[in-house]
Image (tube, rainbow, N blue to C red):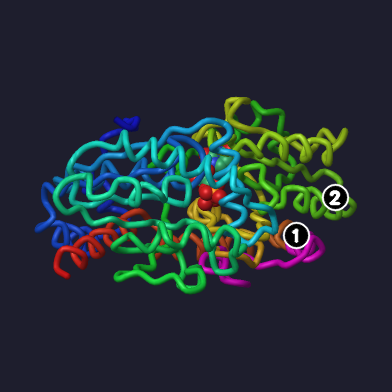
Amino acid sequence: MLQRVDVEEKRLDDYHPIVGEEVIAEIRCLAEPLRSARVVHVNATAYGGGVAEILQTLVPLMRDLGMEAEWQVIEGSDAFFNVTKACHNGLQGMDLPFTDEMKAVWRRYNERNAARFEGEYDFVIVHDPQPAGLRYYQGDGAGDRPRWIWRCHIDTSHPNPAYWDFFVPYLTLYDAGVFTMEQYVGPGLTFRHLAIIPPTIDPLSPKNRPMEPDRARGIVARFGVDVDRPLITQVSRFDPWKDPLGVIDAYRIVKREVPEVQLALVGSMASDDPEGWTFLDRTIRHAGEDFDIHILHNFHGVGPVEVGAFQTVSDVIVQKSIREGFGLVVAEALWKGKPVIGGNAGGIPLQVIDGQTGFLVDSVKACADRILYLLRHPEESARMGAAGKEHVRRNFLITRHLRDYLALFRRLTEA
Ligand code: UDP
């Protein structure tokens, strides 16, 4: 048995006041013939990162619709997760070697996990490259005729060929591929069914549900931040693609003009991301002795509620990614009514409409300029934040995600 992840109960009706009658009715209608469908999501980690965040809500809502939905995680050693991190980077185009030994580690753990994968399912959704070999090694297991879906959360548009050529044969075995954006589908990869489904956030999760400003201020103050002075925040893993070092550089430019400004870099350490610790060290060194830079992670007690509090209290939210899958943190911040200054990468431009819901930036200097602009124009900042919240309500809430999965299931069963 693969390890099962426990999830809370959630009810679709609770989303009614936020998304409206029509959205709920459409979901119920799509779900009707899928009642009691057996669905399993498989990924690499139960905690940390966007995939875990999504599954925590998607799985319970599928259950609420009558499906037998489950979430299971694969197991791996440090060696395996080092290899899968390289795969993540290589598939996103990083120039790094993929040795025969690394390939053997990946195959070995995928084979082992496939051997432990049990049960009968109608839909098996495998998330990301780590467990992508499950379909191959499982053969015709997992019941009579499950539909196999590979859900890719990363940008494989310009992959390193050493990695891509290795992965493609495993991927083409799936009945369907799901990508965040059309242009993320790497060269030559085709599926019988392709669905484009951008990720979404749960407006009722502890991180995203509305928080009283005083409570949020109290929480942020506990981490040593002076809530009466301006605060810039970036919430993300400590990862080169997220460019925390660039955020520190932008903050330093701002600080010359607004000496009271503070910066919070908030990042959880995912269990499948060993590189995170190394990059955290680099970030801390880059920050040096500046006590107005607060570098925090889950081991400091920054959980979902605290992340929500930082997003609620901050004057400016930055997500200066150089490469990005989607950037759930952007939707989370917009949902708090905050404009976001985002790197012009991946799914960020879907969310940050330049000049309307925030600003898109390509450099440290541009990032600093936009931070200064928002700090100096609080009314405009509030107006952009309100537009951002509405943009998320229409396009990036979990109900839309659920609807898209149901529509895909229907396509696969009716095909
Ligand atoms: N996150 C968190 N605590 C942190 C840092 C991040 O809960 O200290 C969450 C964040 O709120 C978001 C997810 O982890 O929901 C990250 O998703 P995103 O798509 O932004 O990036 P990924 O890590 O998947 O590349």
> What residue range appears in magenta?
348-372
Q: Secondary structure at mark 1?
A: helix
Question: Looking at the picture, which amino acid does disc 1 mark?
Answer: Arg
Task: Specify whether residue 48 is painted magenta.
Answer: no
**Snapshot quadrant of residue 392:** bottom left
Using the numbered discs, state the Cα–Cα distance from disc 1 to disc 2 in whole angstroms.
17 Å
Label 1 CB-ligand 1 distance < 8 A:
no
Q: Residue at x 18, y 51 (%)?
A: 122
Sequence-wise, which precedes: disc 1 or disc 2? 2
Q: Residues within 10 Å of mark 1 (few under 14, many from 20)?
A: few
Q: Nearer the viewer, mark 1 or mark 2?
A: 2
Horizontally, is 156 left or right of 205 in the view? right
Where is mark 2, residue-wise? 252
**Snapshot quadrant of residue 72:** top left
State the quadrant of the C terminus.
bottom left
| Along the viewing direction, whichever of 272 and 67 lies nearer the viewer | 272
Label 2 CB-ligand 1 distance < 8 A:
no
Task: Specify whether residue 351 is painted magenta.
Answer: yes
Where is mark 1, residue-wise? 376
Horizontally, is 23 left or right of 278 in the view? left
| Along the viewing direction, whichever of 152 and 320 lies nearer the viewer | 152
Q: Is residue 51 above or below residue 281?
A: below
Horizontally, is 242 left or right of 142 in the view? right
Residue 114 visible, this angle: yes
